Image (spheres, helix red, strand yellow):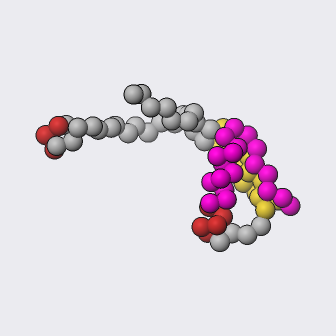
């Protein structure tokens, strides 16, 4: 509420759906398929660099939640 001096707030609720489902496996070359594949490829690259993982992977985005869209 506004008593704490905050002007904006939010509420988080757990949902069983929609959900994101991905399958990741080693591969002879890096392949990223499915919805949001460009974004998923960027995240895969960042994750591998951060964790020091080398090699190629096959990532399939089987299901993804819609991208966030602001209300204002």
Please, which residue is most extreme toward the front here? 72
Please, which residue is most extreme toward the left here? 3
Give the residue at x 33% y 37%: 10
Is residue 36 shown in magenta?
A: yes
The reply to whether residue 62 is in sight is no
Image quadrant in which the C terminus is located: top left
Please, which residue is most extreme toward the top here? 71
Q: Position of residue 68 (x, y in %)?
A: 51, 35
The reply to whether residue 60 is in sight is yes
**Highlighted range, magenta:** 28-46
Please, which residue is most extreme toward the right here? 28
Give the residue at x 19% y 37%: 1
Residue 2 horizontal side relative to residue 36, left or right: left
Residue 72 horizontal side relative to residue 8, left or right: right
Give the residue at x 69% y 45%: 38
Residue 46 horizontal side relative to residue 70, left or right: right
Q: Position of residue 45 (x, y in %)?
A: 67, 59
Give the residue at x 44% y 39%: 14
Q: Establish if 3 lies above or below 44.
A: above
Residue 50 horizontal side relative to residue 27, left or right: left
Snapshot quadrant of residue 21: top right
Q: Position of residue 25 (x, y in %)?
A: 76, 57
Snapshot quadrant of residue 67: top right
Q: Position of residue 19 (x, y in %)?
A: 57, 38
């Amino acid at each position: 509420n506004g008593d704490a001096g905050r002007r904006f707030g939010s509420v988080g609720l757990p949902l069983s759906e929609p959900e994101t489902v991905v399958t990741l496996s080693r591969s002879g070359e890096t392949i990223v398929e499915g919805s949001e594949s460009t974004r998923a490829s960027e995240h895969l690259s960042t994750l591998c660099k951060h964790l020091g993982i080398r090699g190629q992977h096959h990532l399939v985005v089987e299901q993804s939640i819609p991208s966030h869209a602001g209300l204002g």
